[in-house]
Image: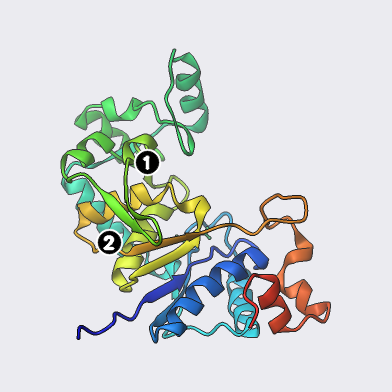
Amino acid sequence: MAPVPRPVTRFAPSPTGLLHLGHAHSALQGWRRARAAGGRFLLRIEDIDPGRCRPEYAAAIEQDLAWLGVDWDGKVRVQSAHLGEYRAVLHALARRGLVYPCFCTRADIAREVAASAAAPHGPDGPLYPGTCRRLTVDERQARVAAGEPHALRLDMARALECVPALAFEEEGQGRIACDPARFGDVVLARKDAPASYHLCVTHDDALQGVTLVTRGEDLKAATDVHRLLQALMGWPAPAYAHHGLLLDAGGRRLAKRDRAATLRDLREAGRSAAEVRAMAGFPD
Ligand code: GLU
């Protein structure tokens, strides 16, 4: 009989605030799946955005998860300690002509979008109109050499020419066809951050051997971009299990503004870890 694969799952929060019940729900999804099947559960701190992330929140994540009874295997991966690895991926894509520098400000993009008769919209808003894609190689090089701040964007049309039709395996739903083009030329490195969520998350899932990505359904659309990056880089495709988001009493999704729902407040209010696990949808 073939051995039953042991899943490698992960929880990958960004340390931009204290964990709330929604995070607990997400962490427990991955943790339970790994523990139930003798697999591995990893913790990764996604802190590449220096403007929003704080080391004290990263420390609080570890403390709050430990209190909740969620343990992880191996060392915590902290993305900000691996910027060179993300840079190497960007260089590899750039060498293949799949990435270009974008000097546009938000205002430039908004102006272009407003001026265009039919600006296409994607899941994250209006698509980048492609202004800097049309610069010549000499113009790009001169502006980069002059130190002009720039992001790096994926040339979506070229990238799609390099890969076959893509799909991903969603638990309980089977194969779902991807349509990354609806995101346009996504940013892979921001002006103010050395890489982007899409790049780091796919790089790390591959590096860490994650086989089942459990995360909120708000990130399901982004999986199209993640599959594209995986295919471009020759990384394996994990399976996905996107879960519903916890809602507050008013039916709104829990967010960091909801102080009352942080694990820390619940603990300080005298709730036990078992009670909080149950509130997060995982009664013992
Ligand atoms: N770091 C992302 C977040 O906190 C989650 C990444 C993922 O699970 O793919 O929203």
Q: Is residue 273 above or below residue 98?
A: below
**Residue drawn at point x = 17 percent, y = 45 percent:** 164
Pointer 2 residue: 237
Residue 72 x %, y %: 48, 83
Residues at marks 2 and 1 touching, judged by CB atoms closer than 8 Å: no
Residue 71 x %, y %: 53, 85
Q: Quadrant of residue 79?
A: bottom left
**Residue drawn at point x = 77 percent, y = 55 percent:** 249
Instruction: Give amino acid for label 1.
Output: Val
Q: In this view, does 63 lie above or below 108?
A: below
Q: In this view, does 105 lie above or below 208?
A: above
Left or right: residue 258 versus residue 197 is right
Q: In what quadrant of the picture does the N terminus appear?
A: bottom left
Frontmost residue, 143 versus 182: 182
Number of marks in picture: 2
Left or right: residue 87 versus residue 138 is right
Instruction: Give amino acid for label 2.
Output: Ala
